[in-house]
């Protein structure tokens, strides 16, 4: 198989608390900061910067103070000047872009690992905005091989980088680590442990890659975002008239076929999936998405072929 | 009536309220009450006044537990007797209003029954919460509900602890009953949790209607879990938690916890064991809202309460 040489990855950032009530990431970053205080540069085999992305939201244990910070990193928001009326999260996004970016420039940090939780039963999902980043896809493949106690899936948004609005798009090879199910405002030991292991394995991969190891290519199964589906709502009041059907609840990444139940209305009717094309639902019943009018997303499964890679020697 | 039969004659339960949204992000109760405000057919019963009511509308609108202070801790004598001045926290104002509408607490004019609908992130299943071990009406109702729900389990939590008991929204009524169903994340509506709560209420209202019709309910016993102690997370000198509920304890509400069993897991991987002398039955394990109340879980002890036969008092 062809071998592709890629530039070294010098610096990595681990970000937690981008949403202040998604607690695994908050505590993973806190624990990493403690390790840094104790061991200094020996804490990890490569330089790692830890960041608490939204400290005010973390303090109040809320998703955000004024605006969802993980929607503030598109080009338009980052290039608009800060004014007195700029929301807190937009100011903070500019700060993080200066610290870890600037986005799109050669000075940007090599990798951002942004830590999130979801109330959906998504196991460990690695989210990236493009299908053509070999570094990120190799890390995903590595995590899939090494983590066996939880399903590890890859989700791709397929968005041009300037439109990509989430924090990890600031770095050259960023991705989000999303672990669920966990209620917001709660830290579960099992979920924390999965996330910590995923971060440790990511650091491990970068270290091995930087040391010259060849990572063999192959196929990586991924899901590409297609569209979102909202809850059935009352046309006047916009309040919900149904909940996710018990047969769909907690079945993230299953295959939805025409006729499968989607919602159970409060008056007992089942709303079914009517589309011809079978697709895979995910982010099923995520708490934060009610206000975004999303009951779940739908995605298409695909195979991405990645080449073998090795670090470029100078 | 035989001289050996001890039947307690109790007042008819004429006025019943169903509160949703005491915490604005606990979605089952909010959804049920809004539904019943629109169309009350499902909750109507002969001869009964039943009022569905959103207790904390501002918190519901924000989908947050509370605005200024927890409404479900606000019904203290001090708050309820506080003068109507500007600057009173929203929930204290609301508590006074609710006390006027459904109380006054402790008086003969108070509503007979209030059901207060809650969700928890803990794996408590369907739980009925009582505040008194001697409220015969409530004991008989809970017994009826448990039997009707079987084989689905309904646990009964009794909080009569002098220090840990708190001034709940429902305490305004003569017979307060808390309904707590989980696990459900805050801000999320799960269909199974919603339907469980709906069914519990159906049976509760059936009981009241049957009681009001003059039927005698024979003596019964009720298995309860009595609140003993609040256990906090290990914390550092800044008050930050240094450990999480241990995976072996997580989701094990109502199961025995014995000395030497794992209780917490620190962020750097060490296990903290339960050191108590007696077996306890933990509940409210890892409830999101209790981190700020310094509670990782509550311990309870198992007890069997006995209730006399009851019948509606003749006028």
Image (cartoon, coloured by chain):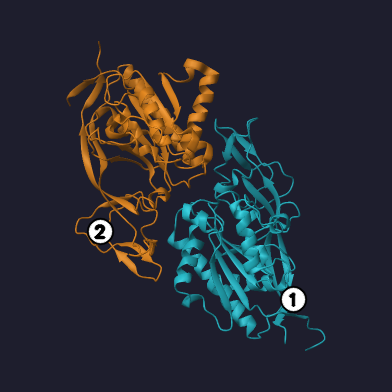
Image side of residue B184 versus residue B70, left or right: left
Q: What is the chain identity of the residue bearing mark 1?
A: B
Give coordinates of residue B182: x percent, y percent: 53, 57
Q: Which residue is at the far left? A: A2
Q: Is residue A209 above or below residue B42?
A: above
Q: Which residue is mark 2?
A: A257
Q: Quadrant of residue A75?
A: top left
- Residues tagged by mark 2 and mark 1 found on one chain of the structure: no
Tag 2, which chain?
Answer: A
Residue at 36 percent of width and 20 percent of height: A11
The hue of chain B in the figure is cyan
Determine the residue located farthest toward the right in the rendered image.
B3
Q: Residue A221, image x and y in percent?
A: 26, 40
Residue B123, quarter of the rendered image: bottom right
**Residue matched to label 1:** B308
Identify which residue is drawn at 70% across, 65% down: B105
Dividing the image into 4 quarters, which one contains the N terminus of chain A? top left
Q: Is residue B156 visible?
A: no
Farthest front residue? B86
Q: CA distance from mark 2 to mark 1?
A: 56 Å
Quadrant, the C terminus of chain A:
top left
Chain in orange in the render: A
B110 and B210: which one is in front?
A: B110
């Amino acid at each position: 198989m062809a071998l592709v040489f890629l530039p070294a990855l010098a610096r990595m950032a681990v970000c937690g608390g981008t949403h202040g009530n998604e607690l695994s990431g908050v505590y993973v970053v806190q624990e990493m900061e403690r390790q840094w205080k104790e061991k200094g540069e020996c804490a990890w085999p490569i330089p790692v910067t830890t960041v608490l992305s939204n400290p005010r939201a973390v303090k109040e244990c809320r998703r955000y103070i004024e605006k969802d910070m993980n929607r503030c990193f598109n080009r338009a928001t980052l290039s608009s000047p800060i004014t007195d009326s700029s929301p807190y999260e937009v100011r903070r996004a500019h700060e993080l872009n200066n610290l870890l970016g600037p986005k799109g420039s050669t000075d940007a940090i090599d990798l951002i690992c942004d830590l999130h939780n979801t109330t959906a039963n998504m196991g460990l999902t690695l989210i990236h905005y493009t299908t053509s980043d070999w570094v990120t896809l190799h890390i995903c493949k590595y995590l899939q091989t090494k983590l066996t106690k939880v399903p590890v899936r890859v989700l791709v948004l397929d968005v041009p980088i300037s439109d990509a609005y989430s924090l990890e798009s600031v770095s050259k090879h960023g991705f989000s680590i999303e672990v669920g199910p966990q209620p917001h405002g709660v830290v579960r030991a099992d979920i924390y442990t999965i996330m910590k292991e995923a971060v440790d394995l990511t650091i491990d991969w970068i270290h091995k890659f930087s040391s010259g190891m060849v990572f063999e290519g192959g196929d990586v199964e991924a899901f590409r975002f297609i569209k979102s589906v909202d809850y059935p709502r009352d046309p006047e009041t916009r309040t919900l008239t149904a909940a996710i059907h018990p047969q769909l609840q907690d079945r993230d990444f299953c295959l939805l076929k025409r006729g499968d139940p989607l919602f159970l209305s409060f008056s007992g009717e089942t709303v079914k999936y009517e589309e011809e094309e079978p697709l895979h639902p995910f982010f099923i019943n995520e708490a934060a998405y009610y206000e975004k009018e999303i009951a779940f997303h739908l995605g298409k499964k695909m195979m991405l072929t990645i080449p073998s890679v090795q670090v470029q020697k100078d | 009536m035989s001289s050996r039969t001890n039947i307690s004659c109790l007042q008819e339960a004429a006025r019943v309220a169903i509160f949703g949204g005491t915490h604005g992000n606990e979605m089952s109760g909010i959804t049920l009450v809004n539904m019943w405000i629109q169309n009350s057919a499902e909750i109507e019963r002969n001869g009964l006044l039943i009022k569905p009511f959103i207790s904390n509308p501002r918190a519901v609108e924000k989908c947050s537990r509370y605005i200024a202070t927890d409404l479900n801790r606000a019904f203290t004598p001090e708050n309820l007797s506080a003068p109507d001045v500007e600057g009173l926290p929203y929930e204290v104002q609301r508590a006074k209003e609710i006390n006027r509408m459904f109380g006054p607490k402790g008086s003969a004019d108070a509503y007979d029954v209030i059901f207060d609908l809650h969700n928890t992130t803990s794996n408590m299943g369907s739980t009925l919460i009582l505040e008194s071990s001697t409220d015969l009406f409530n004991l008989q109702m809970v017994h009826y509900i448990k039997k009707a729900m079987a084989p689905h389990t309904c646990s009964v939590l009794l909080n009569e602890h002098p220090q840990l008991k708190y001034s709940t929204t429902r305490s305004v009524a003569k017979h307060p009953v808390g309904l707590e169903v989980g696990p459900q994340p805050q801000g999320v509506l799960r269909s199974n949790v919603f339907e469980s709560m709906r069914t519990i209420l159906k049976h509760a209202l059936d009981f009241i209607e049957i009681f009001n019709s003059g039927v005698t309910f024979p003596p019964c016993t009720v298995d309860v879990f009595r609140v003993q102690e609040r256990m906090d997370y290990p914390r550092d000198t800044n008050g930050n938690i240094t450990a999480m509920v241990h995976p072996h304890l997580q989701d094990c509400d109502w199961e025995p916890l014995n000395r030497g069993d794992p209780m917490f897991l620190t962020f750097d991987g060490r296990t903290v064991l339960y050191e108590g002398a007696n077996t306890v039955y933990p509940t409210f394990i890892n409830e999101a809202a209790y981190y700020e109340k310094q509670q990782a879980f509550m311990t309870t002890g198992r007890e069997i309460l006995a209730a006399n036969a009851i019948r509606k008092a003749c006028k």
